Image (tube, rainbow, N blue to C red):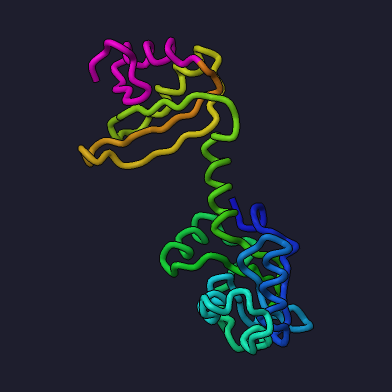
Amino acid sequence: MIVEEIMNDEPYTLAPTNTVQEALKLMREKKVRHLPVVDEERHVLGVITERDIKEVLPSSLQDETNSPIFNAKVEDIMVKDPLIGHPLDFVEEVALTFYESKIGCLPIVSGGKLVGIVTTTDLLYTYIELTGATEPGSKIEIRVSDTPGVLFEITKIFHQHHANVQSVLVYPDSENTQNKILSVRVKTLNPLAMIEDLRKEGFDVLWPNLPGVSL
């Protein structure tokens, strides 16, 4: 998946000469926490966030809109020369950038001009969609050996039960580095028959636990 598929391609923006008060008003009206600052040609000059504003506003001045601080220009407090992304960047690479750089948004630039923005909320929603959690279904977690073909053997069982696989996530087994944990979401509300067949084939089903069965 690439950034172009998840970005907001109509982001709200500010000019560097807009005031802090105008930035705060736009954030509150549009319910956003990050605003790119651009020039007339939509070149990204900086980013201003709700946190940036809070840091320059003493708590005693939160509601005193006549304070000189509110008349300051956003260019005076914005993050200048921010990290940027491209519409064709991979989403997982962008997520790593967010994690390593501890940022909350990434302006997306193509041809030198702002074309969108991605935020942590966008990434979180994308993750939720990828797991299939937005649709009715059941999650089954299986400990497997890290060998070729094991996923094929498991999906054969789902196929036999005419169950659609909504998502498959793979993560390390904290107890044994030679194993992996498969987190499979299938489109059924009653996976018990599939779990029984998985166990018959020797697979270690971790979740859901069946009453009376020791794992």
Residue 170 left/right relative to 203: right
Q: Quadrant of residue 35?
A: bottom right
Q: Residue at the location (31% across, 20% down)?
A: 203
* Magenta segment: 190-215
Locate residue 102, reporting x and y percent. Answer: 44, 67
In this view of the protein, which residue sits in the foreground, 14 or 89?
A: 14
Q: Residue furthest right?
A: 40
Locate residue 66, reporting x and y percent. Answer: 68, 84
Q: Residue at the location (36% across, 25% down)?
A: 207
Does 135 appear above or below 31? above
Q: Quadrant of residue 136?
A: top right
Q: Residue at the location (68% across, 65% down)?
A: 28
Locate residue 78, reporting x and y percent. Answer: 59, 81
In which quadrant is the C terminus drawn? top left
Locate residue 42, reporting x and y percent. Answer: 74, 78
Q: Quadrant of residue 196?
A: top left
In this view of the protein, which residue sits in the foreground, 21 or 181?
A: 21
In this view of the protein, which residue sits in the foreground, 16 or 142?
A: 16
The reply to whether the magenta stretch includes residue 74 is no
Does 54 appear above or below 143? below
